[in-house]
Amino acid sequence: KAGVTQTPRYLIKTRGQQVTLSCSPISGHRSVSWYQQTPGQGLQFLFEYFSETQRNKGNFPGRFSGRQFSNSRSEMNVSTLELGDSALYLCASSLESRVLNTEAFFGQGTRLTVV
Amino acid sequence: AQSVTQPDIHITVSEGASLELRCNYSYGATPYLFWYVQSPGQGLQLLLKYFSGDTLVQGIKGFEAEFKRSQSSFNLRKPSVHWSDAAEYFCAVGARSNFGNEKLTFGTGTRLTIIP
C-alpha cells in the first residue's frame, strides 16, 4: 500500500510570492494534518482536515490556509511568503480524525526555501 | 495548554552502548504520549505510544519508554544502539479539546549520533 505522498519535495520561492503544497494520504485515510518543522522549534501544528472540513487549527497567521478534496487529497497554501516561512512542511494522514487512538503516518515532507 | 520539553538537543552514543532520551510533558489530565523517529530525508515514524495501563511501553526497533507521572516524564530507552538508530527523535503529547478535537504537540527533538 502506498504511503503518504507529498509534492514537490523541494521548492525555492521569493519573498512575497505564494506557494501551494500537495499531500496525497494513504488510500482510505480521511484525515490529513499539516505541520511546519524548523530547527529549534520542532514540529508545529498548522491544521487538520477531515472529510473536506477543517477540524482543528494551530496558531499560524491567515497567510497559511489549506483545503481538502473529496478524494482526501489536501493542499496547503502560503501567501505573501516571508523568509521565516522556510521550513520542512510535513503532512500526516490517519484513518479517522482521532490522532490519539489512530496512528498518523507522515510523508517525507516538502522543503520550502524562501529567498 | 499542553507542552513537551526535550532537554537534550544532541546526544552522541557509541554503537552498542545504552541510550536514554529524556522527555518531560505538561498536561492537566492523563496524557497520551508518543515517541517518533525521523531518519534523514524521511517523515516521522511512530516508535511507541502510551495512554493507559502498564507504564513501561515496548515499541518497534527494540525501543521502550517508561511513563512516570510523578516526574511528568516519558523517557525513551534502548539497551544497545545500532548505527542505523542515528536519527532525530521527537516526543509528543496528545490532547483532546473541549470540542472533541485532538492534536499532537511535539517537542523540539533530540538528534542522536552514533559513533563506531
Image (cartoon, grey):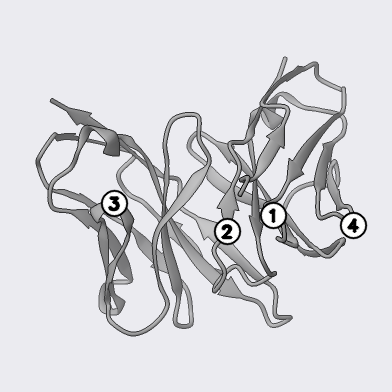
Q: CA distance from mark 1 to mark 4?
A: 16 Å
Question: Which circle's residue, 1 or 4, is located before the other in the chain?
Answer: 1
Q: Quadrant of residue A96?
A: bottom right
Q: Who comes first in sequence, dot 1 or dot 2? A: 1
- Whether the residues at callouts 2 and 3 have beta carbons within 8 Å, the answer is no
Q: Which residue occupies 71% across, 24% down?
A: A83
Q: Say whether mark 4 and mark 2 are on the same chain.
A: yes
Position of residue B33 in the picture relative to residue A63 (left or right) = left
Q: Are marks 2 and 3 on the same chain?
A: no
Chain ID, mark 1: A
> Around disc 4, counting alpha carbons within 10 Å, would you say few (fewer than 14), some (14 to 19), or many (20 or more)?
few
Which residue is found at the position 20% from the left and 38% from the top?
B82
| Secondary-structure class at tag 4 | loop
Would you call the spot at circle 3 few (<14 residues within 10 Å), some (14-19), or many (20 or more)? few
The residue at 90%/57% (across/down) is A70
The amino acid type, in three-letter code, at marker 3 is: Lys
Q: Are marks 1 and 4 on the same chain?
A: yes
Gap in angstroms between the C-alphas marked 4 and 3: 36 Å
Q: Label 3 is found on which chain of the structure? A: B
Residue carrying label 1:
A33
The type of residue carrying mark 2 is Ala
- Identify the residue position indicated by label 3 in the image: B61
Kindly tell me whether residue A57 is visible in this rendering: no
